[in-house]
Image (spheres, coloured by chain):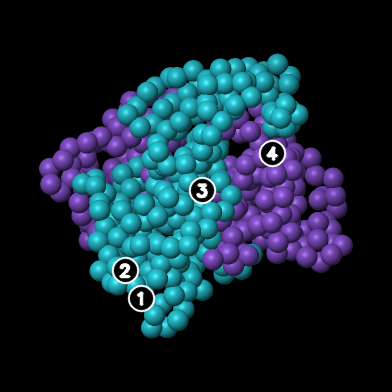
Chain colours: A cyan, B purple
Amino acid sequence: NISTMEECKSKKLTLGEPQLAYDGKWLKYYNVPFTSENGKEGIWEVCGKFPPKMKTSEGSDAPAETPKFGGVIIFPIATDPETNEKIILVEKIFRIPVQKYCIELPAGVRDPHEFDATVTALRELKEETGYIGQNPRVTSVVRSDPWKSTASHAQVFVDVDLTLPENQNPVAELEADEDITPMWLKVKTLKTELESLAKELDADIDQRVYAWALGISRFL
Amino acid sequence: NISTMEECKSKKLTLGEPQLAYDGKWLKYYNVPFTSENGKEGIWEVCGKFPPKMKTSEGSDAPAETPKFGGVIIFPIATDPETNEKIILVEKIFRIPVQKYCIELPAGVRDPHEFDATVTALRELKEETGYIGQNPRVTSVVRSDPWKSTASHAQVFVDVDLTLPENQNPVAELEADEDITPMWLKVKTLKTELESLAKELDADIDQRVYAWALGISRFL
């Protein structure tokens, strides 16, 4: 649909072809030339696993069925069998870029053969925490840090039934470079739970789980 | 405090010195060597405006008073004078990395002389939207994408009084490369407001405002 394509172009900026500036093993770094309305020329720096948005099927090499999510963010929700309260599974994970433990939602990158975010979410949840999830619900695909990154994530809510036999002694399948510990926190008081845990562990909190917690607490 | 420093080191990973791999104008790329518990050696790729966490005042060049936030994410909250409902100011902003408009919270980078996130938040809000904010409240500093990035943001809630004379005809001070349009959305129904607006504008939604909206809507 050409009119839609036109609408999503910037009214103020004209872009040139992205130039690969540095090709890491995982991350790629691009310079994107732009010209502003008043003729100012510049370069925008972009980082990501993927190049700046490929042309869509209107005129390009990317197949029409290319999934629009590069990864998933998982919200694993359970009912505490003892208290009957809603709880959410977060991870204490050591992050080399910040050289510190962070408290985050489980997450992961799409495998090339995965075209359905619910498949990626259930697989990553099992690998990272050992838990078997059910009833995955995908919300809109979102942008993680569109200022500098091409990353996109499907947000997938997953139920975890803690009464199931297979969820009694969950065993993660971690890589040697993954230092991850799953932890259940109460949904209702998630903001203060996160803050207490971060202080106790000298950890930082990821913005996405914290923003959700702020919403839950009606923090205004 | 040495014991705290020890605790925040990974139990499974030993890190080497970050090596600058590519030095862009804004973004820098680092390779961080690591060795895992079982002797596996590898390189972790890191991207950000800042290098991987500098040593703290326990033994380094970074002054003790260095602020721990690299930028701010702003939640500008107002009461609609007509309906008396809570509303939040978001931005439609063209993002070169994703080559599309995104719907995001106002945000910005700390100026070198700014040591208080509320100062950065009020300045950026005025520059990007023209609105004068009041009563800034800072929540925990959070990590935006600690998988690959050194970025950290203070989340600052700001009241905007729409009855003030100075907020009647707000004028932004945009750079030539900024294509930003502020828009007010209802807090109570933010999730559906964001989804409708994204569809209407063929825009993507930023993960942080969407996660907050999911929390507000009690989406589980």
Report how far apart the C-alphas of labels 3 and 1 lie in the structure: 27 Å
Q: Are marks 3 and 4 on the same chain?
A: no
Same chain for mark 4 and mark 1? The answer is no
* Quarter of the rendering containing residue A130: bottom left
- Mark 2 to mark 3 CA distance (whole Å): 24 Å
Give the structural element (helix, strand or loop) at label 2: helix
Pointer 2 and pointer 3 on the same chain:
yes
Q: Is residue A201 above or below residue B62?
A: below
Nearer to the camera, B144 or A114? A114
The answer for which chain carries disc 2 is A
Q: Is residue B158 above or below residue A196?
A: above
Instruction: Answer with mark 3 or mark 1, whichever residue precedes in sequence.
Output: 3
Amino acid type at circle 1 is Thr
Residue ID for mark 3: A154
- Name the mark on residue B202: 4
Work out whether B3 lies above or below B153. Answer: below
**Depth order, front residue of A57/A28:** A57
Chain holding disc 3: A
The residue beneath circle 2 is: A167
